[in-house]
Amino acid sequence: MKTILITTAALALTAGTAFAGGHSVVRLGTEGAYPPYNFINDAGEVDGFERELGDELCARAELECTWVTNDWDSIIPNLVSGNYDAIIAGMSVTDERDEVIDFTTNYTQPDPSVYLAMDGMDLDVSAGVIAAQSNTIQSAYIASSGATLVEFATPEETISAVRNGEADAVLADRAYLLPIADESADLSFAGESVFIGGGVGMGIRESDTDLRDAFSAAIDSMKADGSLNALIAKWEIGEGF
């Protein structure tokens, strides 16, 4: 076991040098606008479940990491172009994304997607106007469901669209919508939950296989010792492993 740990650490250190454009720092890209996964706190710093997770993964892989924020719409193109070295932004693993980038092993189970509508509304999810953040698994699901899709660049805009009558409901991860529903007397869940995607993983450039493997090994170690489940429970992300 000791030999395995030393080998893993050496691999991770090599990955850190090779996969940050020749530098020793690995840059983690996130959106910073999707609590509890990631958000910007009052001190102007990246915070949330993925901040804690990313810092721990880097420590276990013996990588020096820094955080970069990027708009969701361009988060994959900017990874591919080298603006950062990994995406850790509540990104569900899908076949379509896997054609462009690679993924680590998943660090959350698939979170149910739920509809949030004005309280008391009789929602027909198959025929209504449904809002979703653009380029998400929810927007793809709505587009194929028969409902009318309206897309927005940020998750906050999807909530505003429901409140101002642009949309009948929003479809998003339950972990994101639950605190909004709890704090809003005018909004409530409607319809049935849907399960989309294969859980959330870190996005990595397809050429950076060693970096992918180093982070996957760190994720697996957190699954094995229970620390990942503890973090999932702390941030109320969903079911653990």
Image (cartoon, grey):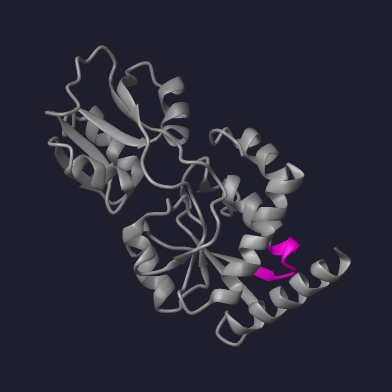
For residue 197, say whether it is visible. Answer: yes
Q: Assign the C terminus to one quadrant of the image.
A: top right
Q: Is residue 54 above or below residue 131?
A: below
Q: Is residue 80 above or below residue 56?
A: below
Q: Is residue 89 left or right of residue 22?
A: left
- Name the image quarter holding residue 231: top right
Is residue 37 within the magenta segment?
Answer: no
Q: Position of residue 56 (x, y in %)?
A: 70, 56
For residue 24, say whether it is visible. Answer: no
- Residue found at the far right of this picture: 2
Q: Is residue 20 above or below residue 53?
A: below
Q: Position of residue 216 (x, y in %)?
A: 61, 61
Q: Assign the N terminus to one quadrant of the image.
A: bottom right
Residue at image position (54%, 52%) is: 106
Residue at image position (23%, 38%) is: 131
Magenta stretch bounds: 58-65
Residue at image position (42%, 54%) is: 93
- Name the image quarter holding residue 117: top left
Q: Is residue 225 above or below residue 25?
A: above
Q: Is residue 239 left or right of residue 146?
A: right
- Return the residue nearer the eye: 72 or 44: 72
Q: Position of residue 156 (x, y in %)?
A: 35, 41
Count how many numbered circles sit on residues in the image.
0
- Residue found at the far top of this picture: 120
Q: Is residue 95 left or right of residue 178?
A: left
Residue at image position (74%, 61%) is: 60
- Return the residue nearer the eye: 174 or 71: 174
Q: Position of residue 80 (x, y in %)?
A: 40, 75
Q: Is residue 173 left or right of residue 221?
A: left
